[in-house]
Amino acid sequence: MQKLHSSPVTEQLSTPTARMGGAMRSQSTRNAWESFQSGEVATVRPQILTSWRRARSNGVDPQRLELTRADIDTQSPFLRAARPVLLRMADLLVGSSTSLALADADGTLAWRWESERALSRALDRAEFEPGSRVGEPVAGTNGIGMAQLTNRTSLVIGAEHYKEPWHAWACIASPVVDPISRRVIGTVNVACRAEDANHLLQVAAGALVDGITTTLREVATARQRRMLSTHLSYCGPAAGPVVTIDQRTMIVDNAPTELRLDRAELWSIVVAAGLSATEVTLHDGWSARLHPVTQGRLHDGVVLVLEHDRRGRCAEQHGISPLAALGPLEQAEFKVINETLAECGGNKSEAAARLGISRGTLYHRVRRYRLG
């Protein structure tokens, strides 16, 4: 986890004298928010100003909440690991006017705890409740939204929130990285009323993330740990994109953003290819060399070392059909599959049956030849 350095706001809230300075800064931030909403120059922390600009470009309403809702997976691995950690911290926060919350990887608030009933009712009125989508694209500047977007610990106090109804609150949010997949799987949020904000917010957030990460590492299976070890053996400063997957887990390094990686899709390609395959074709000119985590055991996971077909990309750029790079047998296979799909009206299940191949194999060929 990246350590959050104390901001001037946090430092000024540490003592009674500093609280007076904090109040002055709060008014200054409110003035900056009003200036921004009026289209004037606003003086505020650079990361907050950048977030405000994103919120404006996304059409977020600064005056009203009206948050959209989403379903919650209450039994997700992230929530199962994180809830007990937060509840242990909660025992130490009773009477402190503090709220703890968890958001999933999509920015939906999935779980919440408050130290007192009055705080719970106030948060409900602020629509900060399980099921609310608080990602920055839909809710504007807030701790969870910024942490989710930047993958960094984010502090938002008072009028730094884009939505005016949240100006009464302060929050610090930190992303949680799965120690196996090394992908952000959720966010921890610690909140209180803006006037109560102090440096302990960041201490609590850091401790919670550390505790959740430790729990996730402890509950990881031996197979997942073996997958990670094998994955890392193929990574290096000069290595290209490396993906290690099984039927439930995907670990990724150095993958370009334009390469759309879907675990279920990749796994279906690997299973269709089988243990005898040493290479598979993906999409958009990408292919992958296969290396089983355990020799002779496909379901223990597979390392995919990705490579890009430069010739195919160059051919496309010069208006040449990608099929021109295929051999005679591949071109014949393309013709048969294309004609069968046309006869079946695009129904892949029917086409696979006619061709005498599995649907997974057909999907693999369709992607390879870009037939749909």
Image (cartoon, rainbow, N blue to C red):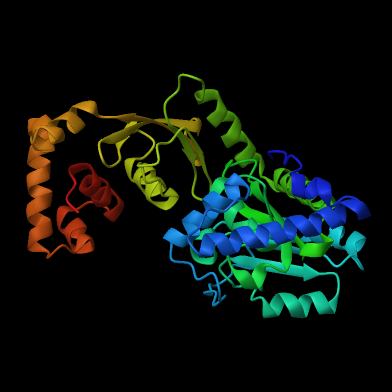
**Residue 107 x, y percent position in the rendering:** 56, 61
Task: State the residue in front, 323 or 256.
Answer: 256
Place of residue 367 in the rendered image (x, y in percent of width and height, measured from the top left): 24, 46
Q: Position of residue 354 (x, y in %)?
A: 15, 58
How many numbered markers are drawn?
0
Is 201 placed above or below 63 here? above
Residue 286 visible to the viewer: yes
The one nearer the camera, 213 or 358, is 213
Residue 204: x and y, percent?
Answer: 81, 51
Report which quarter residue 112 is drawn in: bottom right
Establish if 193 lies above or below 206: below
The residue sitting at 78% across, 69% down in the picture is: 113
Which quarter of the figure is the C terminus placed in?
A: bottom left
Residue displayed at 40% across by 41% down: 257
Residue 80 visible? The answer is no
Q: Residue at x 52, y 49 (%)?
A: 50
Q: Residue shown at 85%/70% (left/top)?
A: 115
Picture layout, residue 351 above or below residue 152: below
Determine the image quadrant of residue 308: top left
Residue farthest to the front? 40
Q: Is residue 311 left or right of residue 230?
A: left
